[in-house]
Image (cartoon, rainbow, N blue to C red):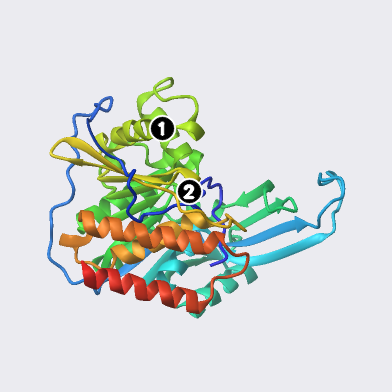
Amino acid sequence: PHVHSHDHHTHTADFHSHPHPHQHESAVACPPVPGSHHTPVCPPLVLESPVKRGMVIGGAVLDCIGRPFAISSGTVPLYTSNPGNVRWSCGGVGRNMAEVIARLGQPIQLLSAVGNDAAGREILRNCDELGIGRSLVQVIENSSTGVYHATEDEKGNLLAAVADMAIFDQITPAFIDQCENAFAETSVICVDCNLSHVTLAHLLTKAHSHGITTVVNPVSVAKSERVCDPNTLRNIDVLILNIYELFHMVETLYGKGTVPSNPENASFEQVVDLGSRLVKAGVCHVLATQGAKGLTHITSSDTKIVAKHFPALPARVINSNGCGDALVGGFVAKLMCETVERRLSKANLEASIEIGLIAAKMTVEREAQISNDEFAALKAKLRGIRSAL
């Protein structure tokens, strides 16, 4: 999909999960989290059918992206109008993830909010076109649909952006409670952190009480703080975040000076150490992305931290916008294929990572929307992996 990950620094273009002679596996002791004696325990296994649908909870916005034509000086002039191209598309982290899941053939429902305006109606039309269930999308009078307005340079690098996401504050715990029947019919939820910390804590607690597998995408460094509480973290099965969000969440939990100062140069050992602190705080599985360096999966086994690194796959990067959303969407689509007793197994998690990485690579290697034929090929691969497990 042609998607944009707002406030998001994940660059997953080069991720790769195929066997590699230099894959790392590591076991280290878990450090304690301040003020907590919690030992992370994954939810108990409950037998169920995998036909239950998934739910994505988060942002649905209209993207407006402006890019000037090439400038002979090499620098885009400021304080003036510049000739160029402007494109509009449906975006939002939650909607982007739901699109990938739907196009991979999985039944998915979107819980979000839009205004009663042209942008909101376009988002609802887009959901219908993609087969995304939108009965849980609130249409709010006298509120504007969320908009992400960005200006890029001629190479596609972000110069500046304005994100109007105020409408998502109206997704409250009370509205989540009104969706009780939908939660009863859901096997996996994927949550972005555009919601308030109060709503996030409430819905993750509710999902956990229903035995629903929970996947969280922090969206940005600042918004990652909204789940930085042990009571919330222990209700997260899978946390997928980039290296900057990982550093910030650990520093928020443990205090200033408790993390290295150079996240962009973090080693495998440093990533494992920081990820292990989130596991100790209650998260079941941490997936930390590092762009061209790949992805590291950190979890616990018999009170020890076990980590595996998935090296990078070279890709011809045309547009990195939305690659993080595509990774999470692909991951969740595969996760949904299994019953809960197998969903978080090592084999299914690694298969889900593989699908997510392929979806991210497909996204960054093109400017336009990914074709239905390309998604059909990935869908077939998803089914093939499932039958082989």
Q: Quadrant of the C terminus?
A: bottom left
The label nearer to you, 2 versus 1, is 1
* Three-letter code, disc 1: Ser
Residue 342 falls left or right of residue 181:
left
Which numbered disc, 2 or 1, marks the residue that appears first in the sequence? 2
Q: CA distance from mark 2 to mark 1?
A: 23 Å
User: Which residue is tagged 2?
Assistant: 219
**What label sits on residue 250 in the rendered view?**
none
In the foreground, 329 or 199: 329
Q: Position of residue 46 (x, y in %)?
A: 13, 61
Q: Is residue 106 visible?
A: no
Residue drawn at 48 percent across, 48 percent down: 219
Q: Is residue 175 visible?
A: yes
Residue 300 falls left or right of residue 314:
left
Most distant residue in the top direction: 257
User: Which residue is tagged 1?
Assistant: 267
Q: Position of residue 42 (x, y in %)?
A: 18, 48
* Element at label 2: loop
On screen, residue 342 above or below 194: below
On screen, residue 46 above or below 216: below
Q: Position of residue 21 (x, y in %)?
A: 32, 47
On screen, residue 382 above or below 255: below
* Element at label 1: loop
* Three-letter code, disc 2: Val
Give the crowd class for mark 1: few <14, some 14-19, many >=20 residues within 10 Å: few
Name which quarter of the figure residue 87 lies in.
bottom right
Residue drawn at 67 percent across, 66 percent down: 88
Give the crowd class for mark 2: few <14, some 14-19, many >=20 residues within 10 Å: many
